[in-house]
Image: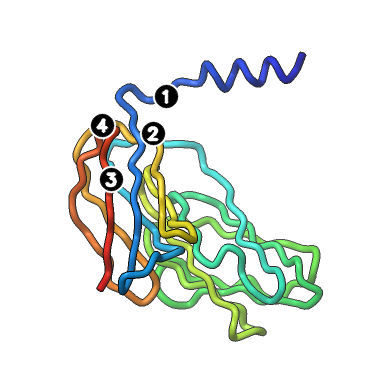
């Protein structure tokens, strides 16, 4: 019986009037690009409750390597390795140092302002990740095929931004109408 109730809630959940998906692809130097972040400016977009996200430490690396979150999101940094880690960010964006902590524990940070936040481990210099905090509910990270989908976007014209590590941010306009596609190319 409980599953029926959950199903009913999912079916009856409101979707914004005129909402559409924005599908797209990302390429750099003619190749599909994973881990590009694409977002739409949306002043007056509905605010949502603070969310929680996880940037895991496993096999002496961060997973995922690139994460996009809405401003105000709390990011957990669990240590699933068998060694200590010391997660920190000292450049750009949110500056913090979580100190050393052992396997099986987690620490967290609230990303309270927009920007690119470079994440490192003080003990393992090869470990690096990015948290991109955006002030909009309309964002996505491209997958291994370079594809992305931004769901439930109200129809309209938006300024878009696209970021990828080591490249300039792309900016332009796109009209979202349900049949739109946004194909982004870095040289």
The residue under label 4 is 155
In this rendered view, identify the residue nearer to me: 71 or 151.
151
First in residue order: circle 3 vs circle 2? 2
User: How many tags in the picture?
Assistant: 4
Q: Are marks 3 and 2 in contact (CB under 8 Å)?
A: no
Instruction: Mark 3 vs mark 1: give the one in front.
Output: 3
The residue under label 1 is 15
- Residue 181, numbered label: 3
Residue drawn at x 51%, y 74% as measured from the top left = 89
First in residue order: circle 4 vs circle 3? 4
Say what secondary structure mark 1 lies in: loop
Q: Residues within 10 Å of mark 2 (few under 14, many from 20)?
A: some
In this rendered view, identify the residue nearer to me: 100 or 149.
149
Say what secondary structure mark 4 lies in: loop
Q: Are marks 2 and 4 in contact (CB under 8 Å)?
A: no
In this rendered view, identify the residue nearer to me: 40 or 186.
186
Residue drawn at x 61%, y 73% as measured from the top left = 87
Q: Residue 104 location, x and y as percent?
A: 80, 64
Instruction: Mark 4 vs mark 3: give the one in front.
Output: 3
User: Which quadrant holds the N terminus?
Assistant: top right
Horizontal side of 81 relative to 154 (left or right) equals right
The residue under label 2 is 152
Q: Quadrant of residue 167?
A: bottom left
Q: Quadrant of residue 88?
A: bottom right
Residue drawn at x 45%, y 20% as measured from the top left = 14
Horizontal side of 121 relative to 162 (left or right) equals right
Q: Are marks 2 and 1 in contact (CB under 8 Å)?
A: yes
What is the distance, in whole Å, between disc 1 and disc 4 at their CAs?
A: 12 Å
Q: Quadrant of residue 105?
A: bottom right
């Amino acid at each position: 019986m409980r599953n029926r109730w959950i199903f009913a809630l999912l079916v009856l959940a409101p979707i914004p009037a005129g909402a559409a998906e924005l599908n797209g692809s990302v390429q750099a130097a003619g190749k599909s690009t994973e881990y590009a972040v694409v977002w739409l400016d949306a002043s007056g977009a509905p605010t949502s409750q603070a969310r929680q996200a996880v940037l895991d430490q496993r096999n002496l690396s961060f997973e995922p390597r690139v994460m996009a979150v809405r401003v105000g999101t709390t990011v957990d940094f669990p240590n699933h390795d068998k060694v200590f880690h010391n997660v920190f960010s000292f450049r750009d964006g949110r500056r913090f140092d979580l100190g050393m902590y052992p396997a099986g524990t987690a620490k967290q940070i609230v990303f309270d302002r927009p920007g690119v936040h470079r994440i490192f481990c003080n003990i393992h210099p090869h470990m690096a990740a990015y948290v991109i905090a955006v002030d909009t509910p309309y964002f996505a990270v491209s997958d291994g095929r370079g594809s992305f989908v931004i769901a439930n976007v109200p129809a309209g014209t938006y300024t878009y931004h696209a970021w990828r590590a080591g490249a300039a941010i792309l900016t332009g306009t796109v009209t979202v109408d349900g049949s739109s596609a946004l194909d982004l190319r870095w040289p």
